[in-house]
Amino acid sequence: MTDKTEQDRVLIFDTTLRDGEQSPGATMTHSEKLEIAQLLDEMGVDIIEAGFPIASDGDFEAVSAIAAQTRNAVICGLARANLGDIERCWEAVRHARRPRIHTFIGTSPLHRDITKLDQDQMVERIQATVSHARNLCDNVQWSPMDATRTERDYLCRVVEVAIKAGASTINIPDTVGYTAPRESAALIAMLRERVPGADEIVFATHCHNDLGMATANALAAVEAGARQIECTINGLGERAGNTALEEVVMALKVRNDIMPYRTGIDTTRIMQASRLVAAVSGFPVQYNKAVVGKNAFAHESGIHQDGVLKNAETFEIMKPEDIGLSATNLVMGKHSGRAALRAKLRDLGYDLGDNQLADVFVRFKGLADRKKEIYDDDLVALMQDAASSGGDDHLKLRSLRVVCGTEGPQTADLVLEIDGQAHSVTASGDGPVDATFKAIEMLFPHQANLQLYQVHAVTEGTDAQATVSVRMEEAGRIVTGQSADTDTVVASAKAYINALNRLVVRRTKTGPRVMSA
Ligand code: KIV
Ligand code: ZN
């Protein structure tokens, strides 16, 4: 099956679970990956790149499970240009209703040096690996990694070989975010014009954001004839990230007058996807991020507020509801019932089943006991906190009592559950947070360095919740953790424990990274 579609339809290929997860520190657990994949499928993503099956057993299992659960989207796995990778990938995606193998090799001079293949040897490798993939699966995508820095004649030659060997999608990656819009368009136009068989396949664009041009480069490629955009939620990805799904999708919707292309995305699920990915990846969305940032629809200046109140179109080019943002900020409190909470959460983009709602309701009541007025941002923080503490966590906080103030020493009495067993300890430190982190380390010794510790108030007031983010590094592995609580020290302890749980997952990932392909 090929994905050749009508002329104005642009396929959305989401690689949050593969390229996004490669972002240092963005490790996701198995159940988090399944949850993201389900949401991507529901919101109309055409192709989900679910992972890199050879990278680790965890990746393999996640891709297999996503393949088995997904109803609509094509499920794609990544494989380097060797038979072992391709076979492992096929094993993982084969149970999908619509499987795809995505195989790649670095074709630029820099990458040919690394693989020690000359131009002819690389052509042979591409021919052999793409045909092998095609013998296993009738939907094969091929990528010349670092295409934008590959000699143009050679790029035409390898693309032609891959098409002849059976690839039905040719992806053109700007691996290091080096290209610019005019060049991105010219590259696709040249390939379409010069490569025999180009009109039989779909060209994809895959841009990185090192110079802040990923969205512009992807849209320029579409104008030149690319019909698949590779992107991630929130632009998550290595270094400066990938093209952001929400940006290209909303740009095509809002400026359909000059870019007459359509996607199959239900844009009202965008905010939900953004929040989910921010919560599970531990990468908060910057406040002024296009489309999904907290300030994207906030009007601070008097002139803007006045204009928006009189006519929203004065300063808003899209409506908050278009991306699933609730139009009202109805305050909730301890007298709010389960039905009101369900309705409010649905407004915020969280559609919960009965069991999930029961769990969140308990957390909500706990928060309402400590905080009189609960705003939308409080509920989002609560949902993110619930998402980041999974039932299968290795470490769980049972209780914490700290002594702090001007008369030292500051101490922390901690009870921590490790694989279901409760352990307790008392530690002292330079302040309550230091004492708490020392107590955790005494019960769960590790070599990770704390690289970042950050506290943000979710709303105003002294009873506001604090969101704490931590980033830790152990032997080159970077993990992040996040949590929210009205008690800053408790939020700190939970964020630290969350990061350690991710470290435990990360330690099992020993496989190759894409850049060493
Ligand atoms: O950026 C890149 O080149 C990639 C390829 C593996 C497609 O992610
Ligand atoms: Zn990439």
Image (cartoon, grey):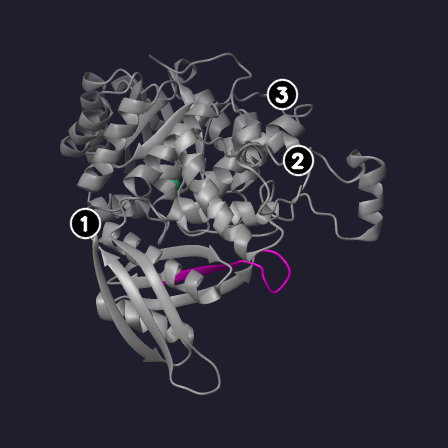
Return the x and y of residue 474 as percentages of the image width and height: 26, 63
Q: Residues within 10 Å of mark 1 (few under 14, many from 20)?
A: few
At 47% from the left and 41% from the top, the residue drawn is 361
Residue corresponding to mark 1: 510
Q: Amino acid at mark 3?
A: Pro
Q: Would you place residue 401 above or below residue 30 in this image?
A: below
User: Which badge, 1 or 3, is on the more N-terminal residue?
Assistant: 3
Return the x and y of residue 105 as percentages of the image width and height: 27, 37
Give the quarter of the image for residue 359: top left
Residue range of the region highlighted in magenta in the rendering: 458-471
> As drawn, is 134 to the left or to the right of 312?
left
Give the quarter of the image for residue 200: top left
Residue 379 visible in this rendered orientation of the protein: yes
> CA gap, disc 1 to disc 3?
44 Å
Q: Nearer the viewer, residue 30 or 8?
A: 30
Give the quadrant of ligand 2.
top left
Q: Name the residue furthest left.
A: 84
Q: Residues within 10 Å of mark 2 (few under 14, many from 20)?
A: some
At 48% from the left and 26% from the top, the residue drawn is 43
Identify the disc placed on residue 320. Answer: 2
Q: Would you place residue 396 above or below residue 205 in this image?
A: below
Q: Quadrant of the N terminus?
A: top left
> CA gap, disc 2 to disc 3?
22 Å
Residue corresponding to mark 3: 260
Q: Is residue 257 magenta?
A: no
Q: Secondary structure at mark 3?
A: loop
Q: Nearer the viewer, residue 205 or 473?
A: 473
User: Which badge, 1 or 2, is on the more N-terminal residue?
Assistant: 2
- Mark nearest the camera among 1 and 3 is 1
